Image (spheres, rainbow, N blue to C red):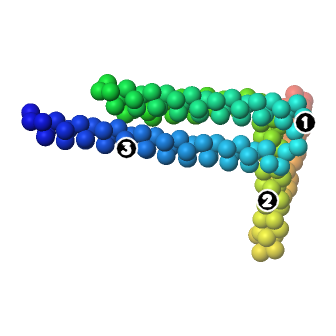
């Protein structure tokens, strides 16, 4: 192998590693951005207590430290690769996946996140109920049966079946009595 070929091979390896690092960094930034955005959305409308807020900030701080540790690991592995060590590009992906899992765990395990998540779910359920009521009104205005109408028909049908069963039982008793008396 000529010196020129070795340099070209080395340049290709370095380019591949640079691309892997750049892609990992880009994914890291996207993951961090999504993480911060989802965390902010979850706590935006809530008013947690001072203790919950403190715990939430502590969880966020731990998540941030996790991201910093991942960045440090990335730099170490990049340096190892630059020194000729055979570093699988999948290691970079794994570093970010593990750190993302750890960071999410740090924030999601806080009472502030739980309180905010509870309020978010409650708000979503309220919105769903309002949307449901609006759709039921729209359906009724178009002359179609609403869920309430269907429920009422179902209840009436059950009542008719219950009454029919009671009449059948009474009829069976009358027939048994007539058979016993040979009438």
Image quadrant assignment for residue 152: bottom right
Q: Residue at image x 71%, y 42%?
A: 39
- Between the residue at mark 3 and the residue at mark 2, the CA separation in whole angstroms equals 49 Å
- Between the residue at mark 1 and the residue at mark 2, the CA separation in whole angstroms equals 33 Å
Kindly tell me whether residue 81 is visible in this rendering: yes
Q: Which residue is mark 2?
A: 132
Horizontal placement of 150 versus 166: left or right?
left
Q: Do the residues bearing badges 1 and 2 touch, measured as CB atoms within 8 Å?
A: no
Q: Earlier in the sequence, mark 1 or mark 2?
A: 1
Q: Position of residue 114 (x, y in %)?
A: 79, 35
The secondary structure type at the circle numbered 2 is helix
Image disc number at residue 178:
none
Image disc number at residue 19:
3
Q: Earlier in the sequence, mark 3 or mark 1?
A: 3
Q: Which residue is mark 1?
A: 49
- Closer to us: 27 or 134: 27
Q: Residue at image x 79%, y 44%?
A: 43
Q: Residue at image x 49%, y 27%?
A: 73
Horizontal placement of 7 versus 169: left or right?
left
Q: Position of residue 143 (x, y in %)?
A: 79, 73
Badge 1: residue crowd in 10 Å (few <14, some 14–19, many ≥20): few
159 in relation to 76, above or below: below
Work out which quarter of the rendered image holds the C terminus and state it.
top right
Badge 2: residue crowd in 10 Å (few <14, some 14–19, many ≥20): few
The secondary structure type at the circle numbered 3 is helix
Foreground: disc 3 or disc 1 = 3
42 in relation to 126, above or below: above
Q: Earlier in the sequence, mark 3 or mark 2?
A: 3
Horizontal placement of 92 versus 131: left or right?
left
Badge 3: residue crowd in 10 Å (few <14, some 14–19, many ≥20): few
Image quadrant assignment for residue 82: top left
Kindly tell me whether residue 174 is visible in this rendering: no
């Amino acid at each position: 192998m000529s010196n020129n070929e070795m340099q070209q091979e080395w340049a290709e390896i370095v380019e591949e590693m640079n691309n892997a690092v750049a892609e990992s960094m880009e994914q890291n930034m996207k993951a961090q951005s999504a993480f911060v955005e989802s965390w902010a959305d979850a706590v935006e409308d809530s008013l947690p207590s001072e203790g919950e807020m403190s715990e939430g900030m502590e969880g966020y701080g731990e998540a941030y430290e996790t991201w910093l540790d991942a960045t440090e690991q990335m730099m170490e592995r990049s340096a190892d690769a630059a020194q000729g060590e055979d570093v699988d590009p999948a290691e970079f992906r794994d570093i970010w996946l593990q750190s993302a899992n750890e960071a999410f765990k740090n924030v999601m395990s806080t009472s502030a996140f739980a309180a905010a998540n509870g309020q978010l779910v409650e708000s979503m359920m309220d919105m769903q109920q309002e949307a449901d009521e609006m759709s039921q009104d729209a359906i009724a205005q178009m002359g179609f049966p609403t869920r309430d109408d269907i429920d009422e028909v179902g209840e009436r049908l059950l009542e008719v079946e219950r009454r029919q069963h009671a009449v059948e039982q009474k009829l069976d008793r009358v027939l048994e009595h007539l058979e016993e008396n040979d009438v």
